[in-house]
Image (cartoon, rainbow, N blue to C red):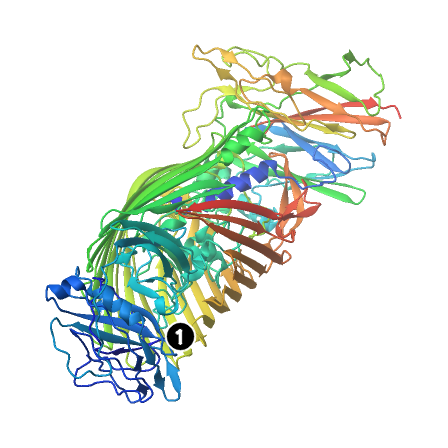
């Protein structure tokens, strides 16, 4: 690092080079000041006397002296040559040269700081050539010599009689003719991504020792730079931006010509983890986990499915299908949103693959409980998928190929204010199955899914931002049996088909005029069509239209108070035609299975057909109170009205956070939450339309410790009470003058309690990962029962260890280890033979009274990226269940339940994929 | 909305596929292989009753060692769910108390139907009694005012048979439909009758009567009923088909029913060897002119005849005898069920060379 000193020195003429310097500030604090003729540099007593100044030139060194720095002094002067033509014409000039002096007093580089008025006279060139030959007594800091940069002024004065020469006056001889010159125009970009490198210092130099000459400049916002007035011949170009490999190359400059060059500089690491998740020290919720999409994509065992990462967070139970069981709540109690907007489904086939491409996702936000009043209609947790705010600097994207599907993503800037992105994906397992399955007469339309999306961001001014997001998802699956595998004559299954199509449009307008106020307005509209057929007796045909309008405003009153509130309106219009048996309900058999009490007699199937509209309106408000430093209390209330049940739910909530110091914080929350019963539970034919809202109260208390910016340790205790839960009943009631089975009531209840431990290591020292452990118990009390039983998805211990390490040469290796308590199941203690259905029916023991062996599994993922000039090739190998553990997933029985066996999950499963990014 | 279920549909598909297709891996005994005490069928003749009518209950029971079998018959107004061990929802004492209040002049039928290999049950349930029982099942004693929807369609009672032999015990249950006085004669069901011969062919040669079967041999077997084989023609044409023609009840959510043949299921049980596990038919197709066509299919250890299919094809099977037979006698049982609770069976015995 260099100190910078301005010195007015001998005046020479130089070539017209205008350079932009990136000043390198040294560790020594300095005050920059204009050199003044009244402050000449103190002559070094050891320096030889300077030769008399040449005709027409004067030198005026005026160093800036600080208390600590002793500036350099001229030891050996050099005479610039006065351009003959300029001298003959009587043209003078003042040229200021920036001179880099090393610790030995030699000139390392000289660059024109201020050129002559007329750049065509050759003053600059003459000044530079002379500057290179100067030798100084080096600057000193105490006893140590230090490199410095000085401004050295050369003044060319025509026909000026020589005055008493000063040691720094130079005798200017007649300069030689200006040498031939050319120009160098260059552009720096990042190799592989083609992103422009902005603000990078570029040095162009040649020669060595006393003959060395060089110039510096800096790249602009396009990554471009240019240098004019370079002498003809070879020049060495050097650029060494931080985080990149240095560029060293030689360019030839021709006389009167412009040399154009483009340089791609390779980054030292292309690890996407380089985007560090910034966890806010002061948060609204007691527990809130945010993970960047590019980090989530690389979690081992998830095959690159970003949304699957939520299953690895503390408080989330493990399920086979990917359903989210958050702190012992049923899957339907947790809502998954996109930018705060409710979206019915985010997965193909209910859990196989998410429908959103990673390119459009910015981050996944997960709140396991005690969430803000801005979220409602849920008693479990919240998963909010945050879409990216587009700001691409170039056209780019990726093509991703795996064994499951292929996806394509493109984004592009249209103008400085507008950017768009599009994506598409299609599976091809259907093609594979059609090719490999034998033709035995059974016709299969294998599972096929596709989705496509479009995202646009428009930001006309910093205060206004508009975003529009549109997506379509389509799933289909069909089997036609040539010979139906029917053993029950009352339920003939000659075909099974499933199809689901959905689309959504989400528009968002953000207005942030100042730090005190912001407003977010969102409106969404969409359509879902579901068609399921099993034979001709069992079917589901549903057509749903959904619209949602949300508005959230936040106003900062002062440094202590901020208020936040809004409205949330949801409209649903559905038309359905359903014929189903009694489906297994929670409590019928546990996650590990049991003897389902399902009648396959088609005469017992229930039918429902209707068309209705439902509304749900919510209003919320909360106050952010910061009475003291490190203290944040957020009381709030939400009011929801549901037309389907006719109920209004009032949900008061409060969370608090108290920082103890820079590292420790306490947090707590208590809140009331409501949600509607599920659709079929409220149906007039298949359920009980008189059901009321389900409710829950969340309590949580935790401590947070952040010893380093990249380390976060949290322990949270939680307790939930669940009331008015929908539960099955055999009661017969009168409704509209008729006796009907009640089917469901709100007499169920539940309780969940436990502790979550989380240790998260953000990217630092090449490592990223986390540990999540949950110890919990989830219980339910069914209608008419006095005792609690374990919830189907109760898992006492849930341990997840995830770690990824960045290796040299763009290698990454990651692993995930999970240990989870075994699934509950209801054992069968005996059986009877059902003659009518020709099958044995098991006699179960207590519901969820036994548990399978624990689940444990190791997944490993290896990534490698190859960086090419304009694109990057990535490959990954994701191996699930590396040591091929036979994890029990459920119990199975022989035909008369006299023998049992354990169904195991997937064996070792390697998946490879390729991705090309450009 | 249904889409809220999301993964629930997937769960149901998985459950259904496993219900139909998932079996215990490495199961030591196949369903249709008889190795221990089994109840294969219970027949009620007639299978449904009008008031005053008596049905005779009999059972097809297999005992591997020809040991003595004890029988215990009983009935119950309604069977509880599996979680309650399939017990009776209304105790005999509760029924007796209810019955005495109805003033029918008929003694309440005892739940105990005896310990003989066969039993009899008489329909002594006038509609008033049916309503009373239904009300009692619902826990409501106002029998004169209430008519429960489930019982209005006809009281279904449950018959139970417990057989014991040696140390083994099996309990089987069957539903009996108690029709009301106005039940139409042509809506009555009959038990299918599969009695007849079975043709056995080995390498194209039909076995003679009494000829021994050879170990480690693959036989083509075809059941030939004495009657009820003419199932190919239209329903409207009078024919002799084991699958009776009838007008199904209107099922909510489905189109108006039209007369069709019953769907029947045929299951092979055997004491030795294995049969093919494929089998079944689907509804015969029709072209635009309404002509019937059928597809190539074959029988198996469990097959289903659906109206429009070819019955004859479904009665074929492949029977593979073991390399070393453990017995010198092999038995085949063919049990035929219709979709309305009717059931019938036949059996065949053969000597096996050892």
Residue A706 relative to residue A893: left or right: left
- Name the subunit of mark 1: A
Q: Residue furthest right?
A: B354
Residue A673 relative to residue B218: left or right: left
Residue B51 seen from this side: no
Instruction: Give coordinates of residue A807: x percent, y percent.
Output: 53, 60
Residue B207 sits in quarter: top right
Question: Which residue does the image show at 68% across and 47% down from the upper left?
Answer: A901
Instruction: Give coordinates of residue A426: x percent, y percent.
Output: 43, 38
Residue A720 relative to residue A737: left or right: right
**Quadrant holding the N terminus of chain B:** top left
Instruction: Give coordinates of residue B155: x percent, y percent.
Output: 52, 36
Which residue, given by chain and number where applicable, does mark 1 sit on? A667
Foreground of the two, B2 or A499? A499
Q: Residues within 10 Å of mark 1 (few under 14, many from 20)?
A: many
Residue B294 sits in quarter: top right
Residue A329 seen from this side: yes
Foreground of the two, A817 or A63? A63
Numbered disc 1: secondary structure: strand
Instruction: Give coordinates of residue A68: x percent, y percent.
Output: 32, 88
Residue B220 relative to residue A621: left or right: right
**As displayed, is residue A584 above or below residue B269?**
below
């Amino acid at each position: 690092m260099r100190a910078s000193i301005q010195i007015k020195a001998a005046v020479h003429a130089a070539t017209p080079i205008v350079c932009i310097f990136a000043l390198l500030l040294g560790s020594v604090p300095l005050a920059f000041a204009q050199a003044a003729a009244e402050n000449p540099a103190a002559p070094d007593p050891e320096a030889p006397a300077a030769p008399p100044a040449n005709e027409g030139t004067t030198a005026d060194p005026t160093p800036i002296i600080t208390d600590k720095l002793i500036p350099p002094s001229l030891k050996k002067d050099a005479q610039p040559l006065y351009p003959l033509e300029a001298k003959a014409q009587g043209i003078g000039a003042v040229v200021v040269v920036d001179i880099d002096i090393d610790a030995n007093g030699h000139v390392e580089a000289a660059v024109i700081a201020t050129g002559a008025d007329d750049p065509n006279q050759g003053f600059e060139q003459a000044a530079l050539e002379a500057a290179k030959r100067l030798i100084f007594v080096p600057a000193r800091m105490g006893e140590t010599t230090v490199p410095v940069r000085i401004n050295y002024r050369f003044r060319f004065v025509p026909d000026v009689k020589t005055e008493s020469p000063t040691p720094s006056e130079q005798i200017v001889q007649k300069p030689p003719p200006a040498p031939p010159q050319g120009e160098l125009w260059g552009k720096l970009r990042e190799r592989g991504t083609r992103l422009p490198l902005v603000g990078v210092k570029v040095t162009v130099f040649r020669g060595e020792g006393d003959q060395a000459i060089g110039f510096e400049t800096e790249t602009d916002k396009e990554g471009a730079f240019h240098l004019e007035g370079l002498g003809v011949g070879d020049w060495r170009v050097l650029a060494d931006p931080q985080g990149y490999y240095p560029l060293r190359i030689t360019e030839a400059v021709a006389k009167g010509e412009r040399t154009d060059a483009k340089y791609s500089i390779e980054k030292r690491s292309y690890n996407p983890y380089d985007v560090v998740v910034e966890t806010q020290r002061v948060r609204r919720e007691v527990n809130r986990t945010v993970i960047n999409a590019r980090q989530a994509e690389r979690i081992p065992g998830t095959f690159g499915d970003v949304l699957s990462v939520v299953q690895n967070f503390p408080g989330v139970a493990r399920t086979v299908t990917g359903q989210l069981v958050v702190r012992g709540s049923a899957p339907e109690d947790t809502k998954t949103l996109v930018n705060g907007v409710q979206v019915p489904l985010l997965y193909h086939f209910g859990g196989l693959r998410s429908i959103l491409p990673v390119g459009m996702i910015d981050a996944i936000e997960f709140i396991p409980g005690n969430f803000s009043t801005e979220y409602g209609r849920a008693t479990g947790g919240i998963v909010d998928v945050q879409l990216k705010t587009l700001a691409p600097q170039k056209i780019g994207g990726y093509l991703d190929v795996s064994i499951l599907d292929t996806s394509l993503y493109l984004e592009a800037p249209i103008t400085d204010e507008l950017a768009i992105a599009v994506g598409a994906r299609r599976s091809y397992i259907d093609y594979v199955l059609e090719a490999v399955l034998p033709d035995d007469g059974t016709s299969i339309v294998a599972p096929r899914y596709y989705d496509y999306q479009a995202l646009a961001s428009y930001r006309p001014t910093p205060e206004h931002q508009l975003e529009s997001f549109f997506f379509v998802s389509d799933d289909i699956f069909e089997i036609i049996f040539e010979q139906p595998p029917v053993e029950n004559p009352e339920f003939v299954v000659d075909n099974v088909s499933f199809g689901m199509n959905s689309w959504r449009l989400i528009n968002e307008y953000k207005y942030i005029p100042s730090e005190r106020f912001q407003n977010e307005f969102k409106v969404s509209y969409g359509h879902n069509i579901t068609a399921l057929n099993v034979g001709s007796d069992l079917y589901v045909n549903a057509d749903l239209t959904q619209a949602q309008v949300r508005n959230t405003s936040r106003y900062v009153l002062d440094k202590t108070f901020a208020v936040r509130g809004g409205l949330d309106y949801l409209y649903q219009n559905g038309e359905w035609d359903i014929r189903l048996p009694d489906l297994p309900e929670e409590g019928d058999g546990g996650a590990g299975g049991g003897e389902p009490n399902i009648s396959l007699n088609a005469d017992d199937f229930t039918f429902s057909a209707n068309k209705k509209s439902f509304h749900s309106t919510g209003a919320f408000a909360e106050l952010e109170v910061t009475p003291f430093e490190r203290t944040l209390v957020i009381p709030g209330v939400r009011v929801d009205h549901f037309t389907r049940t006719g109920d209004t739910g009032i949900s008061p909530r409060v969370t608090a956070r108290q920082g103890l110091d820079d590292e420790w914080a306490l947090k707590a929350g208590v809140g009331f939450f409501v949600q509607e019963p599920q659709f079929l539970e409220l149906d007039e034919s298949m359920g009980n339309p008189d059901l009321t809202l389900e409710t829950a109260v969340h309590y949580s208390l935790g401590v947070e410790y952040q010893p380093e910016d990249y380390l976060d340790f949290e322990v949270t205790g939680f307790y939930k009470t669940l009331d008015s839960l929908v539960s099955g009943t055999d009661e017969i009631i009168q409704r509209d003058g008729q006796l009907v089975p009640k089917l469901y009531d709100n007499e169920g209840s539940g309780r969940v309690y436990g502790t979550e431990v989380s240790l998260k290591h953000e990217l630092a020292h090449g490592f990223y990962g986390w540990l999540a452990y949950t110890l919990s118990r989830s219980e339910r009390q069914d209608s008419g029962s006095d005792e609690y039983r374990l919830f189907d998805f109760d898992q006492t211990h849930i341990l997840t260890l995830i770690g990824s390490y960045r290796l040299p040469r763009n290698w990454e290796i990651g692993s995930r280890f999970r240990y989870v308590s075994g699934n509950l199941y209801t054992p069968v203690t005996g059986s009877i033979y059902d003659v009518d259905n020709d099958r044995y029916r098991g006699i179960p023991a207590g519901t969820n009274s036994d548990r399978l062996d624990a689940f444990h599994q190791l997944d490993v993922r290896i990534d490698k990226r190859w960086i090419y000039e304009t694109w990057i090739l990535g490959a990954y190998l994701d191996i699930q269940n590396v040591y091929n553990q036979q994890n029990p997933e459920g119990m199975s029985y022989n035909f008369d339940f006299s023998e049992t066996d354990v169904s195991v999950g997937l064996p070792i499963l390697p998946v490879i994929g390729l991705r090309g990014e450009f | 909305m249904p889409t809220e279920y999301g993964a629930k549909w997937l769960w149901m598909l998985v459950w259904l596929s496993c219900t139909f297709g998932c079996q215990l891996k490495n199961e030591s005994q196949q369903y249709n292989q008889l190795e221990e005490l089994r109840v294969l069928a219970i027949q009620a003749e007639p299978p449904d009753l009008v008031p005053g009518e008596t049905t005779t209950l009999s059972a097809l029971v297999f005992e591997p060692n020809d040991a003595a079998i004890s029988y215990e018959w009983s009935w119950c107004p309604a069977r509880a769910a599996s979680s309650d061990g399939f017990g009776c929802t209304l105790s005999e004492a509760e029924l007796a108390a209810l019955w005495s209040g109805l003033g029918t002049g008929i003694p309440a039928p005892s739940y105990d139907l005896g310990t003989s290999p066969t039993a009899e049950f008489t329909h002594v349930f006038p509609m008033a009694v049916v309503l009373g029982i239904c009300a009692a099942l619902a826990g409501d004693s106002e029998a004169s005012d209430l008519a429960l929807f489930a019982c209005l369609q006809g009281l279904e009672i449950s018959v139970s048979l417990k057989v014991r032999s040696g140390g083994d015990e099996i309990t089987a249950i069957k539903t009996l439909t108690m029709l009301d006085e106005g039940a139409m004669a042509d809506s009555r069901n009959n038990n299918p009758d599969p009695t007849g011969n079975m043709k056995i062919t080995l390498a194209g040669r039909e076995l003679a009567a009494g000829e021994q079967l050879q170990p480690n041999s693959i036989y083509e077997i075809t059941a030939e009923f004495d009657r009820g084989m003419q199932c190919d023609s239209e329903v409207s044409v009078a024919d002799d088909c084991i699958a009776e023609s009838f007008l199904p009840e209107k099922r909510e959510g489905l189109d108006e029913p039209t007369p069709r043949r019953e769907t029947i299921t045929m299951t092979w049980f055997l004491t030795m060897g294995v049969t093919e596990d494929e089998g079944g038919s689907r509804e015969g197709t029709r072209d635009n002119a309404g002509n019937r066509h059928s597809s190539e299919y074959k029988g198996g250890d469990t097959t289903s005849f659906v109206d429009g299919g070819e019955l004859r094809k479904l009665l074929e099977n492949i029977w593979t005898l073991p390399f070393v037979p453990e017995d010198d006698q092999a038995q085949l049982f063919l049990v035929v069920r219709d979709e309305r609770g009717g059931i019938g069976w036949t059996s065949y015995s053969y000597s096996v060379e050892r």
